[in-house]
Amino acid sequence: MKMNTSRRANTEKRTLNMAAARPGSGLKATALPGVRSKAARAMTLVEMMVAIGVGFTVITVMATVFTSASCSFAAMTNYVSMDGNSRNALDQMTQEIRQAGDLVEFTPTHLKFGYRAGTNSFLVFDWNAASGQLTEFNTATTTTNVLLTGCNQLAFSLYNSAFAPTTILSQGKGVSVSWTCSRTILGRKSTTEDMQQALIVIRNKPL
């Protein structure tokens, strides 16, 4: 008897709701107990997986763009830094070699000059392949200056008074130097710079 009464009540409510849905009926629809509207439904598993996939794709694209922009900025910064360091090293070497005395030792990675003609001091330029550093050592002041870092290759060349290449120390009147430097981005060498210096004349060496 109670079940029949409940069914009859639900039937009457459905009838009233259908009547309320009609325009101009003036009736207000009421929600049936245990029945949820479409707006109140939770996300299904498929909908959740699609949402997660779309979100993951968006995050991946953003991360890729950010990484690419960061690498480009780092590369530009490296080029600016290497260019400035190369210019400073060349200016320092040119000034010191032109004012130095006679060249007393020469190899493709080593130069030794009498420091300031008439003194017993020496000016030494050395490139260390292991550390990638070009250094300047002055025995008069016992100071060592690091002119370049991250230098992968470096070579000194010797020229005579006719500006022709030579390996004879006594004929050396000019020196040139070339090198290749690099910097790393995310642990990989990705930016390099080649530098070629014009001939530096050893002014205090007699012809």
Image: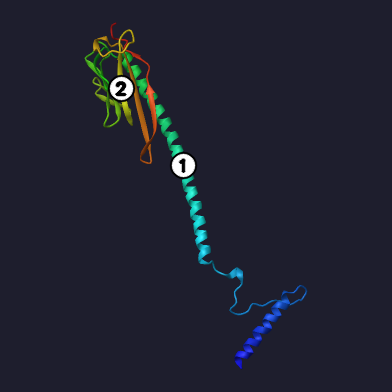
Can residue 149 be seen in the rendering of this structure? no
Category of crowding for the residue at label 2, using alpha-carbon neighbours closer than 10 angstroms: few (below 14), some (14–19), many (at least 20): some
On residue 155, which mark appears? Answer: 2
Q: Nearer the viewer, residue 37 or 46?
A: 46
Residue at horizontal 49 percent and vertical 59 percent from the top: 52
Q: Earlier in the sequence, mark 1 or mark 2?
A: 1
Residue at horizontal 51 percent and vertical 64 percent from the top: 46
Q: Is residue 101 left or right of residue 197?
A: left
> Residue at the front extreme?
46
As drawn, 42 above or below 158: below
Q: Is residue 87 left or right of residue 120?
A: right
Residue topped by disc 1: 68
> Residue at the bottom extreme?
1
Q: Position of residue 69 (x, y in %)?
A: 47, 41
Q: Position of residue 200 (x, y in %)?
A: 34, 15
The three-letter amino acid code for the residue at tag 2 is: Ala
Give the quarter of the image for residue 160. Answer: top left
